[in-house]
Each structure stands twice: as C-alpha cells, then as structure tokens.
C-alpha cells in the first residue's frame, strides 16, 4: 500500500477505487507466487485478479495507470527476489517476474478492450434512444434525460443532419465517429430507417456545410438543418433534415451537401407539413395580409413570364413601382420573384395557400 501512495494519481481516486486497486495488486502478487510453480500455464484475466475488477474501476483507472500499477507491484517483488530464489536461480526468477509483467499487462489490455466494447454498445444504444425520441417528438423531460446520458446539456445549441450511407451503415457510423474525434466535436449518431442521422453541438462562426462534409465525407449526400437553441428542440430540425434527404433527388445538379432550408419547396411537394405551413405563411398569408396588391403582383408576374415591362403594363403601374413591389415581396417572404428558385418557392406557397383557402382543408388533408 505504501508503494501505491507514491503514485501521483492514486490519492485522487475515490475510496472505493483505491480499495479495488489495492485488492488487484495484492491478488496479482499472490497469483504470481502460485503461477511461479507452473510458469508454462497461460495467464488469463480470470487468474490474474483482473477478471473480478468492477467495470467502474476500469473507468476510474486508465490502462496506462494500470500498467504503472503492474510495474509498481513487480517493483516491490524484485528487491527481495534474491531471498525468494534458491542459490543460482536469481536470474531465472527475475526473468519470470518480467515475463509475468508482460502477461498481466496483456490480460489488462483484454479487460479494457472488453470494457470499451461494452461502453461503445451502451453509447450506441443511448444515442439511438435519443434520436428516436427526437424524431417521434417525445416530451422535453424525456429528451433532456436521454440527452444527458450522451453528454448534452439543455443549453447546448445544436445542428441536425441526415445522410445516405455509401457503405455498410455500421462502418459508416464508425467512420463518422472517428471524424468527430479528430475534429474534437461532440456528435451523436444513429441509424434511422437506413439513413445515418447526426446531431452535433455548434460552435461560433462555423459553416454547417463544411462541418457536414468533414463528418460525412466530401461527396456524401447529406442535408443539414438548424441551428436550434437546445437539443431539446432538435426534433423538428432532425425531421427537416430527413425530409430534405427524401426531397434531395429533385436537385440532382446541386452540390452533395445542402441545407434543409434550400429544399423548402421540394420538402413541401413531398408532403412535409412543416414545410407546407412555412411556405404558405411566408408566400401567401403575408402577401395576402399586406393589403398592398402584392398577391396580384405575383399573379401578373407569372402571367407575363417575369418580364417587367409587360407585367407593369398589365397591372398597370410604372415599372419602377413594380420594382418597388418586387423588393417588398422579397422583404416579406425571403424569396426574390426575379430569381428562378425564389419564383418557384413563391408559386408553390401561393398555390398551397389558395387551395387551403378554397377547400378549407387542413394541412394534413393536402
């Protein structure tokens, strides 16, 4: 025990951990004396004293510290080797001590490998539980509890992403986790209906598409959503990312990684209710409620294929007045009617809004 006190990290262990360490060291020395009578017998974790170590002890003491313990224990034996050995056997005994040290270090490595495997399986299960809770919309209290098990606090802002694996999904998950460790990023990953989904803690001034490429690979087909202020609120963002991936084939000529907001119209077309609601609010309700002829301006622009002079004549207004209205439409909706993508979004939102108005349909009916 006195030799253990010389280790600079030993005093920092809990009383229970110190007890486990002392027990293992003493058991190791006792088993060495037993093994010495039959040194050709292979050493296993179960007959070195390591097999009975609680998993919590392996979490409290690192593999490197365990090797240091082995060295300390054997160092206590070496000075008295001469008194233990018969005359002429001193060198042989020192060789057996060194051999025992190697064998027990290997047994320790096996114990830590087993603990790491169990920890990895537990983390994967907890990550999967959290992702399932986010996607299915479980209560904030349930999500907070599950998030705490994988190291997320409620105050952590996050982004969410979904990706189509290009190899065996389990291998792909392992690659993403390795990338996350290299980037020193806190990332939760899981499989969901054949897709890889991920949630990561955001950082100031990060570019989400760059982070996604670093995690998933430069050519991955992925969609990113967020940020949101807390992992508790990450469910809708994760659902947007998954829906965006389903809508991704509509944009075959665009880059591999996209933000879900860039696929708002496509997500609405495949039936994502949240995307439909957002488009209707931004492109129909706001223009209709503005009371300044903006919805009529949209109709006339479409009727005249976006040609300003023709549309201004049809309204009729001066072309500069039309330009002002188009600027106002862009300000209210976030989409520019003079841009093909913006025009597509406005057309989709206005069409959905008018169908709802005409039929009294709720979003789920469309």
Image (spheres, rainbow, N blue to C red):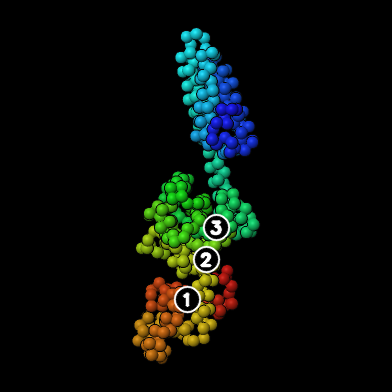
Residue 125 position in % (x across, y down): 57, 46
Residue at numbered disc 1? 333
Residue at numbered disc 2? 272
Residue 62 position in % (x across, y down): 53, 36
Q: Which mark is residue 15?
A: none
**Position of residue 60 in the picture relative to residue 318 (left or right):** right
Tell me which numbered mark, 3 or 1, is placed earlier along the sequence: 3
Seen in the picture, residue 354 relative to 124 is either above or below; the reply is: below
Distance CA(mark 3)–CA(mark 2):
27 Å
Residue at numbered disc 3? 156
Please tell me which residue is depicted at 47% across the width and 76% down the height of the picture: 333
Please tell me which residue is depicted at 61% across the width and 55% down the height of the picture: 144
Residue 290 position in % (x across, y down): 51, 83
Question: Regarding mark 1 in the picture, which secondary structure is present there?
Answer: helix
Seen in the picture, residue 36 relative to 288 is either above or below; the reply is: above
Residue 316 position in % (x across, y down): 41, 91
């Amino acid at each position: 025990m006195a030799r253990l006190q010389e280790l600079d990290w030993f005093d920092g262990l809990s009383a229970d951990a110190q007890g486990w360490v002392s027990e293992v060291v003493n058991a190791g020395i006792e088993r060495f004396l037993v093994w010495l009578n039959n040194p050709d017998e292979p050493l296993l974790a179960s007959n070195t004293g390591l097999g009975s170590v609680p998993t919590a002890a392996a979490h409290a003491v690192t593999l490197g510290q365990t090797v240091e313990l082995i060295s300390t224990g054997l160092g206590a034996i070496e000075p008295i080797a001469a008194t233990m050995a018969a005359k002429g056997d001193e060198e042989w005994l020192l060789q057996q001590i060194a051999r025992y040290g190697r064998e027990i270090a290997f047994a320790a490595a096996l114990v830590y490998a087993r603990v790491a495997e169990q920890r990895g399986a537990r983390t994967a299960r907890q990550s999967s539980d959290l992702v399932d809770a986010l996607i299915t919309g479980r209560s904030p209290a349930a999500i907070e509890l599950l998030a705490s098990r994988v190291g997320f606090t409620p105050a952590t802002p996050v982004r969410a992403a979904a990706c189509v694996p290009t190899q065996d999904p389990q291998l792909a998950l392992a690659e993403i986790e390795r990338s996350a460790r290299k980037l020193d990023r806190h990332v939760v990953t899981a499989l969901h209906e054949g897709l890889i989904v991920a949630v990561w803690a955001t950082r100031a001034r990060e570019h989400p598409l760059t982070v996604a490429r670093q995690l998933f690979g430069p050519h991955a087909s992925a969609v990113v959503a967020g940020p949101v202020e807390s992992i508790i609120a990450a469910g809708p963002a994760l659902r947007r990312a998954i829906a965006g991936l389903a809508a991704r084939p509509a944009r075959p000529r665009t880059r591999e990684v996209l933000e879900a907001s860039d696929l708002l119209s496509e997500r609405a077309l495949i039936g994502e209710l949240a995307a439909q609601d957002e488009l209707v609010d931004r492109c129909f309700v706001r223009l209709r409620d503005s009371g300044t002829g903006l919805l009529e301006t949209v109709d006339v622009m479409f009727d005249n294929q976006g040609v300003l002079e023709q549309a201004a004549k049809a309204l009729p207004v001066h072309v500069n007045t039309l330009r002002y209205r188009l600027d106002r439409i862009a300000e209210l909706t976030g989409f520019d009617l003079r841009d093909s993508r913006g025009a597509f979004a406005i057309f989709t939102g206005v069409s959905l809004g008018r169908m709802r108005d005409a039929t009294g349909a709720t979003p789920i009916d469309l």
